[in-house]
Amino acid sequence: MHNFDKPFRLGLYEKAMPAALSWEEKIQVARELGFDFIEISVDESDERLRRLDWPDEDIYRLRHLCEHYGMPLQSMCLSAHRRFPFGSEDEAVRREAYLIMEKAINLAYKLGIRCIQLAGYDVYYEPQSEATHLRFIEGMKAATKMAERAGVMLGVEIMDTPYLNSLSKFEVLKKAIPSPYFMAYPDVGNITGWNYDTCTELKLSSEHIVQIHLKDTLKVSAQSKGQFRDLVIGEGQVDFPAIFRTLAEMQYNGPMVVEMWAQDEQWASNLRLAKSRLVTMGRQAGLALA
């Protein structure tokens, strides 16, 4: 039985743990560190893309491991579309984007994953245009129809690039795709990094947020391109106390995920430190994070 009697379920991004760990070890680590679930990564690397072709035997073995330890895979971070974007000029790349989406929803369904985080990029390695934007919207509409059929939620990530770096921009997109299966997955680090008022942004999209990434960043300025990854929570410029107060006012009750990267031997102590900082700030703001 999962613990639903506390207001928050706090998940751990898979890449916060070393890639060399087996799934069983990752699950044990996440549990030992006091997290409630893991967010699995399907990124643009060949190795992680292969997960989309796992045989059922492997999928259900992993699901049983999760059940055994009481550590579900609540969500999937699907960043594979960075390499194969819906907005691409190249028809073969677009076909791959649709296929990746179909396979990811199928994998999510079998693993019991409830939410797939989509990358808010029309294109990443190609020049942007009105045409790439329109193809991205077309792709999002098709992806939403696939997700509706499986009953799996799509959450578009608010990104580290200008194309979709605020919830205000998501709201414009949402008007084109009003489905209840097409929602926002804000990353408070990315919104802060682009100098938006993160608390106002969260309130703006309060009815459309399905999950939240907790990540620290350094802001973009005339002197700096900002830093959007590899910081331990508490070492950047994200105002977590204000964000938590806003979430408490909004009565937000959805899951949150700590997004960090295992960069060195200190990864486990960094995670302990980040979690204790978040719990302290959350309690002070009126959110019980543990």
Image (cartoon, grey):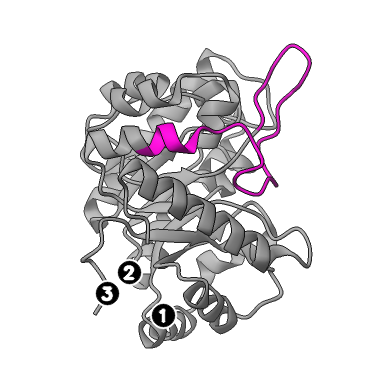
Q: Secondary structure at mark 2?
A: loop
Q: CA distance from mark 2 to mark 3?
A: 14 Å
Residue nearest the observer in this picture, 55 or 267: 267
Query: Label 3: how many residues lie within 10 Å, few (<14), some (14-19) or many (20+)?
Result: few
Is tag 2's residue or tag 3's residue first in the polypeptide sequence? 3
The answer to the question of whether label 1 and label 3 lie on touching residues, with beta carbons closer than 8 A, is no
Residue 121 visible: no
From the image, tell me which residue sits under label 2: 112
* Vertical side of 57 occupied by 53: above or below: above
Residue at screen point 28% across, 29% down: 177
The answer to the question of whether label 2 and label 1 lie on touching residues, with beta carbons closer than 8 A, is yes
Residue nearest the observer in this picture, 38 or 30: 30
* Vertical side of 21 occupied by 89: above or below: above
Q: Residue furthest front?
A: 284
Residue nearest the observer in this picture, 120 or 196: 196
Query: Label 1: how many residues lie within 10 Å, few (<14), some (14-19) or many (20+)?
Result: many
Circle number at residue 145: none
Please state which amino acid type lies under the numbered disc 3: His
Q: Measuring from the top left, give residue 196's x and y in whole percent.
A: 50, 19
Circle 2 or circle 3, nearest the eye:
3
Give the mark count. Answer: 3
Residue range in magenta is 218-244
From the image, tell me which residue sits under label 1: 66
On whether residue 203 falls in the magenta region, the answer is no
Is tag 2's residue or tag 1's residue first in the polypeptide sequence? 1
Judged left or right of residue 163, residue 290 is left
Residue 169 visible: yes
